[in-house]
């Protein structure tokens, strides 16, 4: 792509660690009388698998030549361990994130492990931490046990979001330039263990528990249509007041988490020419205060961008993708500058550690991935100018999603916007799901775990150069478990024997297999990224964190391991 050719002259000293990949014959695909049928169940609607971008006339993005400072290409040898200095240029269907480590420290990496083929499962997984569960703290530099690399698969729309499980867990800062910094910076000094607050400030109808889409709102497919029906804004305000409260923040804290990723739409700042109601920004302010009271961090996630970056319901408007058309990219940047003015203040520096500038933009037509890359760089520079001009938090991280192209694709962008001898405040976000492709839905659980163990390579590579987060991940795969404890692609098995069933109906073997997958992902993310955010706090069935904890499929405490060393 033209933009990547332009920046290829910049040499980047980013260590690439050659991890030995697990042998493909380590996986057994069982065939038995209880094998399950075609995938179904509740799947979060998301973008289709990406293809290589192509655009004859890509949208115009502000030139970087006047924005980007000259970049030195040398890296002190004291800053890096012996490693290859090449950066992969080929595309990938996987995505990963890099973690924050001081550049002055030696870069150490956990060896890339292999996965065994055992598909046996414990017949009992109590909700409370059993006496035989091991606990470890992967955030400690001395802890290397239970580490598991992770991998990423793009999401696609694969089911009807109206097929909901019935199990859902109920439940303006001044921009003036300050003279002092009243709070310590929120730059993470350790691993962030986070939760997404989905379906709150950006609604996702498939996550509704029946409290929102009722009466005249039953046909609302996204926030655009919902707000259009909600003429006076009273219904959306009632939802904001009830869906997520300070009591929920305290509950999440009690689960062992220390961070929140909170989606919000661009219309919270500028709703001109749309049916969207303003007011969500006030609730983001409240959530920041609640997080402060709980000692937690917040990533402000611009989940919906002008023109829709992906055409999915979670962008705010389902349908056409015109984010890179007309003046929508420039409008996105201007709104993000206002977001950093509002939430990137010194007063918020103890809580708000990052602003995510776009969520899951399509990489292929009508978008152009190279345009998304150049826009991310120019928007970072524009936000940095806003930060400098207004005395804002200079340590706040500016995060972009990787468009399911892989986080390493943004290492070169990070080198443009800051000196390569530093880890930058420009970061990248990867989302990991194994639910939305035919290939993923043909796997048994050992194969899913093996794939998750492969996600760490790109994460580790990216983490050496820039902040990297797994901004979304799920406990779910589409599998069933037979009476002998063997797994097969699902759903379609006996009631309670498949992950597609209501989580309250899962038998002990299904719970055990879900927990295996959860622990493998946690080990990977905690070894190779700056932090992870499960999707989501409140959602149907196995999509809901509270539901997973209730049935014992999510470790409590979070660093407890019933199945340690799965990737070793």
Image (cartoon, grey):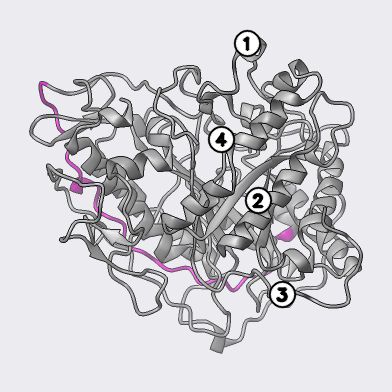
**Front-most of 88 and 377?**
377
Percent of width and height locating residue 380: 77, 58
Residue span colored magenta: 7-33
The Cα atoms of the two marked residues, 4 and 3, are separated by: 31 Å
SS at badge 1: helix
Left or right: residue 294 compared with residue 202: left
Of marks 2 and 3, which one's residue comes earlier in the chain?
2
**Front-most of 469 and 163?**
163
Of marks 2 and 1, which one's residue comes earlier in the chain?
1
The answer to whether marks 1 and 3 mark residues whose Cβ atoms lie closer than 8 Å is no
Where does label 3 land, which residue?
A: 419
The answer to whether marks 4 and 2 mark residues whose Cβ atoms lie closer than 8 Å is no
Where does label 2 land, which residue?
A: 287
Few, some or many residues within 10 Å of mark 2 (<14, 14–19, 20+):
some
**Front-most of 355 and 107?**
355
Where does label 1 land, which residue?
A: 215
Any mark on residue 353, and which? Answer: none
The Cα atoms of the two marked residues, 1 and 4, are separated by: 37 Å
Confirm whether the magenta stretch covers residue 288. Answer: no
The Cα atoms of the two marked residues, 4 and 2, are separated by: 34 Å
Where does label 4 land, which residue?
A: 50
């Amino acid at each position: 792509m033209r933009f990547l050719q332009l920046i290829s002259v910049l040499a980047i000293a980013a260590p690439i660690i050659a991890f030995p990949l697990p042998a493909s014959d380590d996986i057994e695909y069982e065939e038995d009388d209880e094998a399950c049928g075609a995938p179904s169940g509740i799947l979060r609607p998301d973008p289709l698998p990406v293809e290589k971008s192509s655009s004859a006339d890509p949208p115009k993005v502000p030139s970087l030549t006047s924005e980007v400072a000259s970049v030195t290409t040398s890296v002190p040898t004291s800053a890096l361990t012996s490693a290859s200095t090449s950066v992969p240029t080929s595309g990938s269907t996987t995505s990963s994130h890099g973690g924050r480590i001081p550049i002055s420290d030696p870069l150490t990496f956990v060896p890339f492990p292999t996965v065994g083929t055992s598909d046996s499962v414990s017949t009992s997984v109590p909700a409370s931490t059993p006496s035989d569960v091991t606990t470890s703290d992967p955030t400690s530099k001395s802890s290397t046990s239970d580490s598991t690399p992770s991998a990423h698969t793009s999401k696609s729309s694969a089911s009807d979001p109206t097929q909901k499980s019935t199990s859902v867990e109920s439940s303006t800062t001044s921009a003036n330039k300050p003279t002092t910094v009243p709070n310590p910076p929120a730059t993470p000094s350790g691993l962030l263990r986070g939760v997404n607050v989905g379906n709150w400030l950006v609604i996702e109808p498939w996550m509704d528990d029946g409290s929102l889409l009722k009466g005249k709102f039953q046909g609302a497919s996204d926030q655009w249509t919902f707000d259009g029906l909600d003429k006076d804004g009273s219904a959306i305000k009632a939802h904001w007041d009830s869906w997520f409260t300070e009591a929920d923040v305290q509950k999440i804290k009690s689960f062992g988490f220390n961070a929140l990723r909170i989606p919000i739409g661009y219309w919270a700042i500028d709703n001109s020419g749309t049916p969207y109601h303003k007011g969500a920004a006030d609730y983001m302010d409240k959530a920041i205060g609640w997080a402060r009271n709980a000692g937690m961090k917040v990533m402000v996630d611009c989940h919906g961008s002008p023109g829709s970056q992906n055409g999915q319901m979670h962008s705010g408007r389902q349908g056409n993708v015109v984010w890179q058309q007309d003046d929508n990219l420039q409008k996105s940047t201007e709104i993000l500058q206002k977001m950093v003015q509002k939430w990137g203040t010194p007063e918020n520096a103890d809580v708000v550690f990052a602003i995510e500038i776009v969520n899951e933009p399509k990489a292929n037509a009508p978008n152009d991935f190279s345009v998304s890359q150049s826009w991310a760089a120019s928007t970072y520079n524009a936000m940095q100018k806003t930060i400098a001009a207004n005395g804002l938090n200079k340590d706040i991280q500016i995060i972009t999603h990787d468009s399911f192209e892989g986080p390493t694709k943004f290492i070169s962008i990070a080198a443009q916007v800051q000196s390569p001898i530093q880890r930058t405040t420009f970061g990248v976000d990867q989302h990991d799901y194994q639910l939305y492709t035919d290939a993923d839905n043909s796997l048994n659980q050992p194969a899913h775990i093996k794939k998750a163990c492969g996600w760490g390579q790109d994460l580790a590579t990216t983490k050496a150069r820039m902040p990297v987060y797994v901004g979304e991940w799920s406990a779910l795969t589409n599998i069933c478990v037979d009476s002998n404890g063997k797994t097969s692609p699902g759903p379609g098995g006996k009631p309670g024997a498949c992950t597609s069933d209501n989580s309250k109906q899962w038998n002990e073997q299904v719970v055990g297999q879900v927990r295996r997958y959860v622990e493998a992902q946690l080990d990977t993310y905690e070894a190779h990224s700056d932090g992870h955010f499960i999707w989501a706090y409140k959602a149907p069935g196995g999509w809901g964190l509270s539901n997973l904890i209730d049935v014992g499929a999510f470790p409590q405490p979070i660093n407890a391991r019933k199945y340690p060393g799965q990737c070793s």
